[in-house]
Amino acid sequence: MQERSEGAIADMECVVQGIIETQHVEALEILLQGLCGVQRERLRIHEICLKSSPHLGIVASEVRLLCELEQGEPSWTVKHVGGAMRGAGAEQISVLVRSMVQSKTSKNALRMFYTLGYKLDYELLRVGFSFNFFRGAQISVTVSSINKMLKMHATDEAVPVTPGIQIVEVTAPATAETYTEVASAVSSFCEYLAPLLHLSKPGISTGVVPTAAAASASLMSDVGGKLRGTKKFLDSSKVRKMALTNSTSFRQLFQRAASAQFRRPLLHLVSTQEGKHRYLTLCVPLHKAALKGDWKAAKKILEQDSTLLNSAITKGWATVLHVAVGANHVHFVEELVNLMQRHDLELLDMKGNTAFCFAAAVGNVHIAEIMRRKNESLPTIRGGEGVTPLHLALLQGRSEMARYLFDKTKEILNDQDRNILFLICVNSGLYELALEMLNENESLAFARGDNYETGLHVLARKPSNCGCGSLLIRYPKHLLRLCKEETPALKLTKRMWEIFLTLDDSDLMDAIREPSQVTFSAAEMGNFEFLSVILSTYPDLIWELNTMGRSIIHVAALHRHASIFNLIHEIGPTKDVLLTFIDDEGSTLLHCVAEIAPPDRLNIVPGAALQMMLELTWFEEVRKIMQASYIEMPNNEGIIPGEHFTKQHEDLLQKGEGWMQRTASSCMVVSTLIATGVFSAAFSVPGGNNDNSQSPNFLKKASFLVFALSDALALITSSTSTLIFLSILISRYAEEDFRTSLPFKLITGLVSLFISIISMMVAFSSTFFITYYHGLKWVPKVIAVLAVLPIPLFIGLQFRLWHDILYSHYICSFLFTPSKRMIR
């Protein structure tokens, strides 16, 4: 038997059971489909109840083995249902709260229980469907018929126990701490089912409800039926009499389930065969008109049948208002709302969302205000899975809508709602609203989400609080000077940290360490301003080590954040102590920086060669501040930092070689073409030569002098560029070459190529001034202007390359000179 994972399964459950006639199950299924917002799951469970012998003592007296037959590979579960919960008001709850232990197992469990002395009490086959969803609690609704086996374990030979009757069971797992909230959620959900079902809290006199069929027996106790194993079954005729109070036809039940009592639109056009023709002739055109915002066409259709205002026009139960709001047509919605009744605006689609939820999701405040004026309660009506419109607006990042809804919704928000909404605000970057919520309720600072993170943990993972965006990655030193004004994110960080500082030291450390240490998260993301706030008031955190025995400095170096790494210069002589820290793998700080950078940090410059230059710069800068004895210190694997760097960057070095060769080859082709062209032009003198002296006719003209000088300069620089790129091609491509010679050659070659292009265009333009000297003087002027265009084009296309080369090799070195103190 598989062991139950600790904390994965609750030890209690809340239960409500009921019965319904089979002919009315379709109406119930439609209602559940809308209430739950999920698809049904087919159910076919073989249930075996075993009872222990008296001599087994304290072990469970009754256990059930449940086999899910609907799956491709049958899965087994062992379950023990204990007594009803008593005390703490459990007797007054309208839902049975009972103990329960459940675990996945295998078919071998049956043999094990037989070996332990358990005897077969009864076995049943439950066939039907279930819905599993979250609505204040994790709720499961099963609707099934109960069948008995004619032969032991023969699931293919079963007959109904109560023909014409199906058992409905609503269950939710709980714990001793949460059962009241879970029971309340189950009770609230069951209110929707009450008009269709005969629901009841199962009898608790014995504290045990063996099966769903036994539950119906407890409901029918006043008519004398009682189930005990497979020996005696309910009188189905008596059960049917109690199944529905005031027996109703299916059509009446269906209309009742679809009425506004359940906030559901009329479903007669989308769920009945007789309504199919009207669906095609009315609903489809109305749906198209709503999508297009064609109010004239929609009005004509609505005049034919006014019930379309509160009818579902899609299979998902969306009304025309849902469609129009989702399509963001303000005028259409305004005209439509004027025709509708107040309660029509509360109709829900199949997923449980009002049209106002759609407005919140699309973020159209104008539409939301139009609808709210008609029905002021709309902002407080929860949508699918019990979330408010404010929740939906925040999930979609609609800041204006969230601000609009917050004041109108905050009175109905419980603590759980506020915690969730606060964390969504922080995650979505809606810091001003989060700060407002925090100022109203300081306990939100300690709210934790599904991953157990507080808002402070989320803020730590933000790349930058100062709002300088991705530019801060490249220029932390320079752009931090521009971020003097406190942004909403920084204000929220300071406010949250102030609240955290009210805790005792031990509680504070526990709060920021779980699930991960906030300072290390910030160091990984390069969140300089966040760390500045934290360390300025709690500088001892700089000595904290993560699970691998690394400090903030180690993490900053590993993730290539120079602004945070420069913190090493602010701690004075004690930095020598920090530099000697060795992690759990025996690695020094130099080993950390020898590891290849994470992809997101490596890609801040394009091209493998430039990335290699940047990596070498980091390694050299860190080596400068390391103590001599630690530069060659091996780690636990006996590898020194230099060897570790070479091994880690082997692939990058090869890719850098390929990138450099391709770049040099491309540039050399261009420079060679320029050299060839200007060389030929030198011997093709514009204007021709004097027949007598063989000297150029326009030798003394200024334009000819410009031509001669520019042509010569173009030839010299293009030839120089060609030779430089040739030297790059035949380079040995060692690590030190990427550090010094290759960047210099590449920059020099590109500059020479740029000068040769300018000189060539000047020579080209000057020939037209010489040729058209005696007439059509506007021609050379136009050509000269056009000839200038390739120059800025070349600059624009190649600027990023020049910049990246300079940044990788030269500018990056200055990043290690601190310009702004972190600890202030």
Image (spheres, grey):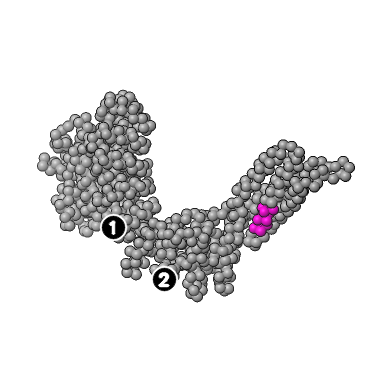
Identity of the residue drawn at 15% across and 53% down: 91
Q: Is residue 179 left or right of residue 712?
A: left
Q: Which residue is mark 1?
A: 440
Magenta segment: 742-753
- Magenta-drawn stretch contains 750: yes
Residue 632: x and y in percent read 58, 70
Majority secondary structure of magenta residues = helix
Q: Which residue is mark 2?
A: 540
Q: Determine the image quadrant of residue 329.
A: top left
Secondary structure category for the residue under label 1: helix
Question: For the residues carrying marks 1 and 2, which lies nearer the camera in this image?
Answer: 1
User: Can residue 36 be seen here?
Assistant: no
The disc, 1 or 2, on the residue closer to the chain's N-terminal end is 1
Residue 389: x and y in percent read 30, 45
Q: Is residue 479 left or right of residue 164?
A: right
Q: Determine the image quadrant of residue 18.
A: top left
